[in-house]
Amino acid sequence: MTYETTRRTVLLATGATGAAALVTACGGGGDDSGSTSTQSPTGGDATSGPAGQVLANIDEIPVGGGKIFKDEEVVVTQPEQGQFKAFSAICTHQRCLVSTVSDGTINCPCHGSKFRVADGAVAHGPATRPLPAEKITVEGNSVRLT
């Protein structure tokens, strides 16, 4: 007979002290479902630690548009004043690097796919999957990749 080890099995086997340590170690502490736009006086939050590399000043990201950071393979957008989003700059169709942000879309030069600046969703194919979100923080006047 075969038994599958589950988190519950491990928690039961380790007792209260071990369970507390295991839950603390395994805690996700957040939602990884999208990009973040948080402001923190300490340069980060409890789950990401200190904020990472500065990508740009907020005034470099146009409202309704965005800016591509080729070396980091990230595109940062500002769909509405003060709202910043970040997505992978790699097209989900054939893995080309997107090349422009205009008219509310992030544009891939290879086959014409377009993605919405607000959420990375496909606005025009052939891509069928949205651009994956990246995590950023906004601290003061800086946009940081976290």
Image (spheres, rainbow, N blue to C red):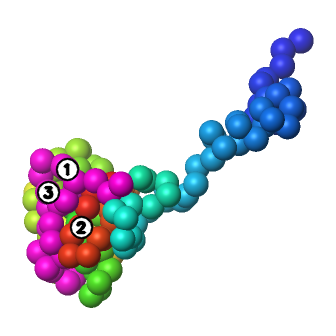
**Residue bearing the label numbered 3:** 69
Image quarter in which the C terminus is found:
bottom left
Q: Is residue 8 depicted above or below 138 in this figure?
A: above
Q: Where is 19 relative to 85, above or below? A: above
Amino acid at the residue labelled 3: Phe
* Residue 81 in the image, given as x and y percentages of width and height: 27, 87
Query: In whole angstroms, how far apart are the C-alphas of marks 3 and 2?
Result: 12 Å
Q: Which comes sooner in the sequence, label 3 or label 2?
A: 3
SS of the residue at dot 3? strand
Q: Residue at x 15, y 66 (%)?
A: 56
- What's the residue at 10%, 65% (across, down)? 100
Q: Which label was assigned to residue 143?
A: 2
Residue 8 percent location from the top left of the image: 82, 36
Q: Circle 1 sits in a helix, a strand or a loop, which is it?
A: loop
Q: What is the span of residues highlighted in magenta in the rendered image?
A: 50-74
Residue type beneath disc 1: Glu
Q: Nearer the viewer, mark 1 or mark 2?
A: 2
Mark found first going from the N terminus, 1 or 2: 1
